[in-house]
Image (cartoon, coloured by chain):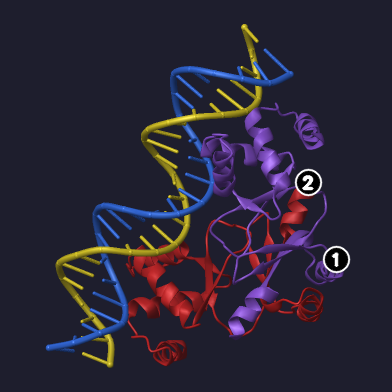
Chain colours: A red, B purple, C blue, D yellow
DNA sequence: GTCAGTGCAAAGATTTTGCACTTTG
DNA sequence: CAAAGTGCAAAATCTTTGCACTGAC
């Protein structure tokens, strides 16, 4: 399993011990097709008979987020934080209000805009958060009926 | 007081009774120079000797948000919701990581982008949330020292 | 063996809710 | 006076923390 090896490497380069809990969490995130909440990760682990306490999930995500191994995001569902592997690329999210699916938008339209804003406001711009929401093709169709 | 009269009108057009609690909250929001959390509103009311229970503040904001009299936003401080008067204009926020000041950005750079995204993904795009963060001129200067 | 990491249960923080009482229209 | 709104305390939800135990290096 290549993924497992690379996860160990990621933890090591962050100076973190590679415990079975952290590796299990990383494996879940690696397989995931969209960002997951701490509780979703916890449930998925339990489903595969890997019992990890929810507080450990939170702590591991927090630590690995500090080391930039995972990324913590807050999208539309403003209550829960979501986590995903840090792929090293800045990107955004398109959230379906119908089925809650989240897809990743690779292209960021805001680089130029940040520069303009910097000039206009004299702020030192560090970053931004953008999420777009709407209805995916399937949910759109369902709504029309 | 013109504001007070217009607030009564706003509540009426939403089919809401104009209670002293709601009017007090609206007055606070009207005077505010940036979005406020429920608790900040509660504290400001208490400071002016208008005691309103925190749950009423939440309920009033929620109701008025349904009627689009106020707008609920979630910015960088991902934990707390913030509220402001609904001015009817779509806009964004620039958040200072140093002093937590929030300024409003009137220009929205994403209209074109939404159209492109719609074409690209076949999603029905409903809206988006954008917040930009960085350091305001004063905090930037303080950092350099 | 030491120190980081974990589990559990308890506490925090923010927001919501049930229910009796009050106020508005 | 009916229905909507309020206050209070209690619950719900998500997340963090204290402390004793365990496991990694």
Give the distance between the C-alpha atoms of the residues marked 2 and 1, in whole angstroms: 28 Å
Q: Are marks 2 and 1 on the same chain?
A: no
Q: Residues within 10 Å of mark 2 (few under 14, many from 20)?
A: few
Q: Which residue is mark 1?
A: B111
| Foreground: disc 2 or disc 1 | 1
Residue at position x 74%, y 78% in the image: A108
Residue at position x 65%, y 29% in the image: B20
- Tell me if residue A10 comes above or below residue B78 in the rendering: below
Residue B83 visible, this angle: yes
Task: Provide the secondary structure element on which disc 2 rests.
Answer: loop
> Considering depth in this image, is B91 or A9 the residue closer to the camera?
B91
Query: How far across and down, in percent of the image, does residue C19 sit?
Result: 44, 23
Q: Residues within 10 Å of mark 1 (few under 14, many from 20)?
A: few
Residue at position x 78%, y 35% in the image: B10
Chain at tag 2: A
Query: How far across and down, in percent of the image, does residue A59 sit?
Result: 38, 71
Chain at tag 1: B
Query: How far across and down, in percent of the image, does residue B124 sit?
Result: 79, 59
Task: Provide the secondary structure element on which disc 1 rests.
Answer: helix
Q: Seen in the image, is B89 located left or right of residue A59?
A: right
Task: Point out which mark residue A145 bears.
Answer: 2
Q: Quadrant of the N terminus of chain B?
A: top right
- Tell me if residue A112 comes above or below residue B107 in the rendering: below
Residue A48 visible, this angle: no
Q: Quadrant of the C terminus of chain B?
A: bottom right
- Tell me if residue D25 comes above or below residue A119 in the rendering: below
Residue at position x 58%, y 46% in the image: B38
Q: Quadrant of residue B4?
A: top right
Q: Quadrant of residue D1?
A: top right
> Considering depth in this image, is A71 or A46 the residue closer to the camera?
A71
């Amino acid at each position: 399993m290549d993924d497992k090896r690379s996860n160990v490497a990621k933890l090591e380069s962050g100076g973190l011990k590679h415990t079975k809990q952290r590796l299990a969490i990383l494996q879940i995130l690696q397989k995931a097709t969209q960002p997951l909440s701490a509780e979703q990760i916890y449930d998925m682990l339990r489903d595969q008979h890997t019992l990890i306490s929810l507080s450990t999930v939170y702590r591991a995500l927090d630590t690995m987020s500090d080391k930039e191994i995972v990324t913590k995001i807050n999208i539309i569902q403003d209550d829960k934080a979501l986590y995903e592997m840090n792929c090293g690329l800045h990107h955004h999210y398109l959230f379906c209000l119908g089925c809650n699916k989240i897809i990743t938008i690779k292209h960021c339209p805001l680089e130029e805009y940040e520069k303009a804003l910097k000039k206009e406001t004299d702020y030192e711009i560090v970053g931004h958060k953008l999420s777009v929401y709407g209805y995916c093709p399937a949910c759109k169709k369902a709504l029309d009926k």
